[in-house]
Each structure stands twice: as structure tokens, then as C-alpha cells.
Image (spheres, rainbow, N blue to C red):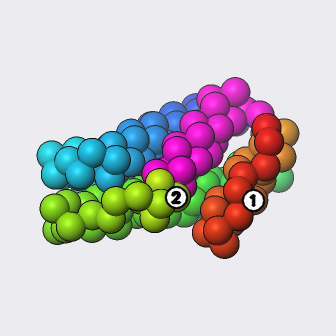
């Protein structure tokens, strides 16, 4: 049973990495759509977001399977709970990209020019960096990368407030 649990945890990790890769791709497509008022890029972002959302159900099933075993070890429980959080966070990243893509698809001829658009593009670039950091953390099993991700989250909040980003 421990060998099977290890394989199932590895499968969950693989699923989360694939989901994060789709989130990165959807953010890139949505940012490209916004930057270029590009409707086909918006359609691509929406397709990627749909694929990502479809993967969340099987990921949650994998997690429940791990937690539903008789007397799971504490490491398995921690891994599964982290998987629950990551699944939600990754899906939210994709949903944000999807909302941007929907706006571009519906209003690509009316998109703002100038400063407002520049801030949105900076937010898109920060979202891309944040998603890449999460992707790298998943691949490298690097829980310590949270500080870098927190810095990016802080920068995003500053952009929303109209302030400039911190130096990296």
C-alpha cells in the first residue's frame, strides 16, 4: 500500500503541474489578447481555461482517494491538503485569465488605450511571473519559494492601488 500511495501522490503532482502549465499558457494568451486586441488569442485563452477547469474534477478525485484510505500517514494528509489548496489557486488563476479573455473577445475593438491599458498589461505580466513561480515550485517541490510568490502578490496589490512595483 505505501508504494501505491507514493505512485498516487506522484500522479497528483503530475496533474497539478499540468494544470499549472495550462494556467500559465492561459495567462499568456489572455495577456497577448489584451496587448494586441487579438480575438483569436482570447479564444485560445478561453479554450485553455476550459481545459484547466475540466482537470480540476479529476484532481479533486485523486485527493479524496488519498484521504479516504484507511489511516493515511500524516505526510500523505499534508500532501493532499496542499493539493486541495493548489487546485483551487490554479483554477482561480485560469479563471482570471478567462475573464480577461472574455472581455477582449467581446470588446476587442473598444479596449482602452494609454495608461489604463498599460497597468492591465503590467498586471498580466506579473500574473504570468507568479504562475511561472508556482509552476517551478511544483516541479522542484520547493515550498520555500513562497516568499517570491508573496512579493509578486504584493506587487499586484500595489498595481491595483495605482502604485508602482517593488524592485526585485
Q: Which residue is mark 1?
A: 154
Q: Residue at x 72, y 52 (%)?
A: 165
The kind of secondary structure element at disc 1 is helix
Looking at the rendered image, the quarter that the N terminus falls into is top right
Estimate the x, y position of residue 113 in percent, counting from the top left: 34, 59
Residue at 64% over, 31% down: 136
131 within the magenta span: yes
Q: Which residues are magenta?
A: 121-142
- Mark 2: few/some/many CA within 10 Å (<14, 14-19, 20+): some
| Nearer to us: label 2 or label 1 | 2
Q: CA distance from mark 2 to mark 1?
A: 15 Å
Task: Say which mark, if any, is on residue 119.
Answer: 2
Judge by depth and name the residue closer to the eye, 130 or 89: 130
**Image vertical order of residue 27 relative to residue 5, above or below:** below
Say whether residue 42 is left or right of residue 162.
left
Magenta stretch: dominant secondary structure: helix
Amino acid at each position: 500500500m505505501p508504494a501505491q500511495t507514493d505512485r498516487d501522490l506522484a500522479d497528483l503532482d503530475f496533474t497539478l503541474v499540468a494544470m499549472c502549465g495550462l494556467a500559465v499558457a492561459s495567462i499568456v494568451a489572455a495577456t497577448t489578447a489584451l496587448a494586441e486586441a487579438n480575438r483569436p488569442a482570447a479564444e485560445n485563452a478561453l479554450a485553455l481555461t476550459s481545459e484547466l477547469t475540466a482537470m480540476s474534477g479529476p484532481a479533486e478525485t485523486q485527493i479524496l482517494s488519498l484521504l479516504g484510505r484507511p489511516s493515511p500517514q500524516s505526510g500523505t494528509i499534508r500532501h493532499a491538503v496542499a493539493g486541495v489548496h493548489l487546485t483551487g489557486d490554479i483554477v482561480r488563476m485560469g479563471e482570471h485569465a478567462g475573464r480577461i479573455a472574455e472581455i477582449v473577445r467581446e470588446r476587442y475593438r473598444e479596449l482602452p488605450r494609454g495608461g489604463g491599458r498599460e497597468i492591465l498589461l503590467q498586471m498580466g505580466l506579473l500574473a504570468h511571473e507568479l504562475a511561472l513561480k508556482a509552476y517551478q515550485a511544483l516541479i522542484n517541490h520547493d515550498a520555500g519559494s513562497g516568499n517570491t510568490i508573496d512579493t509578486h502578490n504584493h506587487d499586484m496589490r500595489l498595481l491595483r492601488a495605482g502604485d508602482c512595483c517593488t524592485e526585485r
